[in-house]
Amino acid sequence: MNRGGTAVESRGGSLDRPLSFRANVSWSFFGTLAHAGSRWLGLVVLARLGGAETVGTLALATAIVSPIFALTNLQLRQIQAVDASGRFSFSTVFGLRLLTSGLALLGVGLYAVLASRGSDLAPVLLFVALAQGFESLSEVIYGRLQRRERLDRVAQSMTCHGVLGIVALALGYAATGRLAVGAAGLAAASLATFLFFDLPSLRAASGGKIGLQPRFPRAELVPLLRSALPLGGTMMLVSLNGQIPRYFLEGSAGRAELGIFAALWQLVAVGNLVVSAVATAASPRLANAAHAGDRAAFRSLSAKLYGLIGIVAGGGILLSLVAGERILLLVFGPDFAARADVLVLLALAGSVGFACAVPGYGLTATGAHGVQLPLFCLITAVSVGLCGWLIPAHGLRGAAIAILGTYLVQFFASNLVLGARLRRLGL
């Protein structure tokens, strides 16, 4: 069997040949980069066509919708990917995803009617929620493909979601001047990718034996929920922590300031692509070292991750200091370039955030899942407190300082918990 092959099978063909580990890492990085790059280009297009306030409206809609779907997604993709014994059938996982995504859409719809009725935000909220809902269905298929070690199809799907989405968003907004039409394009692109790429991939990965008929057997559903609910809660808090500054900025400074913040933070987040790809690839080795009780290997690999993060973070801070204003002027325009000082603070905050990945992956590698939920409850409380204190008084600079403070607390608290875990394991 050729595990290193990368040829994409024809539609309806078999995906019975897994890729090599290196090929899967490469495809994963490519897919993440393409998806994140498309989101960044979407902000650039909106900034050029509609200005900071339009960017702020989309950022606010995303900030409201994302934590809801982070909770209801329940990390079902990862549960499938590590389900080596086949405890949970695809039909059960898909059925649960249909239920939870439906609840998420219902929740967003109620919020749009009750809290945003009559405003320009309501239709944007609904279409952003629809786009994330269709992506959540694709994610269930990603879990099946990941289990088959075919991340090439996952990466190609993510690229389709991203590229089709940015084209539809740009054309819709440019033709009508209405953000809701552009957001409807995002939803249409997600639906098209699910129907015309992900479903054929699912059929190929199962030899045509798996369909989309949902099932709800109690013997599978109850243990699935027991595994998924804590993970969903943790991921909701992780997503919420990234959105809290946006809520406070919109409330105290308006959507234009929120739009500037979203664009600046998207530039900083580019560095996380490198960190995430390498840390994801390193996590199995961390887990193996922890399982084998190999203290030297665990600490050596962690040190190498910190070294890589130092290079990425140092480069980002230096670039923001030397050329931040010029980059913002070239990409987004003068309104954004005027806040280059905030970009430097966000680059510093992002650097600490990158470093948080090491203890985070370390906790997961050592099997410390349950402790992460209360840990992120603490971090969320810190974020709310700092944002509530700093943003009303200092605006964008206050948001950057609040993010920096939150990441510092997360870094030290995570390392304290990880240290206790390692001592318990004799590492």
Image: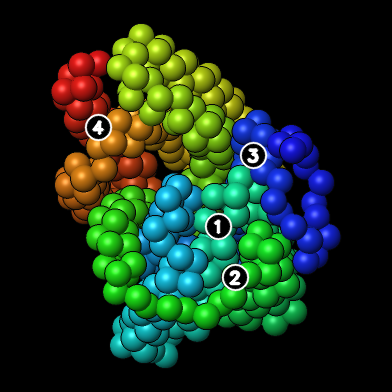
The one of 370 and 307 positioned closer to us in this rendering: 370
N-term-proximal mark, 4 vs 3? 3
Distance from the alpha carbon under mark 4 to that under mark 3? 29 Å
Residue identifier under label 3: 24
The N terminus, quarter of image: top right
N-term-proximal mark, 4 vs 1? 1
Of the two numbered discs 4 and 2 in the rendering, the one whose residue sits closer to the viewer:
2
- Asked if the residue at tag 1 contacts the one at tag 2, i.e. Cβ–Cβ closer than 8 Å, the answer is yes
Amino acid of disc 1: Arg
Return the mark for residue 210. Answer: 2
Of the two numbered discs 4 and 3 in the rendering, the one whose residue sits closer to the viewer:
3
Residue identifier under label 4: 414
**Vertical side of 240 occupied by 346: above or below:** above
Q: Position of residue 58 (x, y in %)?
A: 51, 67
Amino acid of disc 3: Asn
N-term-proximal mark, 2 vs 1? 1
Query: Which residue is depicted at the point 50% across and 83% down?
Result: 123
The one of 181 and 162 positioned closer to us in this rendering: 162
Relative to 407, 164 lies left or right = right
Residue 328 appears in view = no
Query: Which residue is depicted at the point 41% across and 62% down?
Result: 88
